[in-house]
Image (cartoon, grey):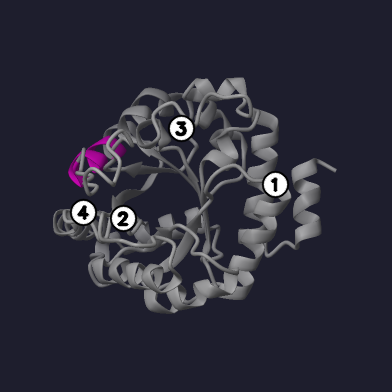
Amino acid sequence: MSRSIIAPADVPPDERSRYLANLDRVTEGSGRLMLMAGDQKVEHLNDDFVGTDVAEDDGDPEHLFRIAAQARIGVFATQLGLIARYAPDYPDIPYLVKLNAKTNLVPTASADPLSRQWHTVEQVVRLRETSGLNIAGVGYTIYPGSRHEAEMFTEAARLIFEAHQHGLLAVIWAYPRGQHVADEHDPHLIAGVTGIVASLGADFAKVNAPTGEPAVLREAVRAAGRTRVVCAGGGETTAEGFLRRLHAQIHEAGVAGSATGRNIHQRPLDEAVRFCNAISAIGFDDTGIDDALRIYRGS
């Protein structure tokens, strides 16, 4: 199922065992990631956390931590501030610290996106060492096509190197966006973007699914090489539709798991936990659709 695990050369010999342990932990040895994304408090403000189709519990940030603590996930990604506030009550969750974020208040039509680093890898390592929390990696968003791409590429390249130096994984959110990007869901463009993430040296590239059938992702997976590709979960969809799409992305295109936020945390706690477990079963265990739906339905 999984490709051979090779620690990159920028992981020092004395950190190689930690790096491989982190990779094994977040993929459960499968080579596939199940990332629960909880960084939307900044990215989407409160839009994702209230509404007629959103569980009332989702208005409280702790809802994210309750899900991550009770469900089978690979890693929970959110900002350092939320981790510092809530993680002491949820120390068993594997965490990924999202190092940059921006709001959606300024539309791309008005200004090309720029998202700068909030914390350093050194600060993440200091938190890991002083708190004893299970911090497995860091994450960062880039916007290829933005006129500010060079700044973000530079920050991303440096933090990936620094993360590997400390045995941490690096996941890059990569969304082509800017006034010169005609179609951010174009499959060929997304393949170009995964190639950028590979060139930066990241372990995983998180991209939006391109337009078309899941098989169109094959180009992006090939372009990424040893950097594994996962797709963002996107907006609200039916559980069955989501699970079928994920299964096809993995088995028809070679995608290495999933990275899902709204489709998980907008559900009530019990349902969100069952949904996580179904997603993880497909990614970690190669579970078929019918069995995954039974997990989700609790039957």
Looking at marks 4 and 2 on the same chain, the residue that comes earlier in the sequence is marked by 4
Can you identify the residue that label 2 sits on?
A: 177
**What kind of secondary structure does the magenta stretch mostly adopt?**
helix
Looking at marks 1 and 4 on the same chain, the residue that comes earlier in the sequence is marked by 4
Q: Amino acid at mark 1?
A: Ala
Quadrant of the image containing the N terminus: bottom right
- Observer-side mark, 1 or 4, equals 1
Is residue 173 depicted above or below 111 in this figure?
A: below
- Observer-side mark, 3 or 2, equals 2
Helix, strand or loop at label 2? It is loop
Q: Which residues are magenta?
A: 120-128
Looking at marks 1 and 3 on the same chain, the residue that comes earlier in the sequence is marked by 3
Q: Is residue 122 magenta?
A: yes
Q: Are marks 1 and 4 in contact (CB under 8 Å)?
A: no
Can you identify the residue that label 1 sits on?
A: 239
Can you identify the residue that label 3 sits on?
A: 91
Q: In the image, 111: left or right of 68? A: left
Q: Amino acid at mark 4?
A: Leu
> For residue 281, which numbered disc appears in the image?
none
Residue 35 visible from this viewpoint: yes
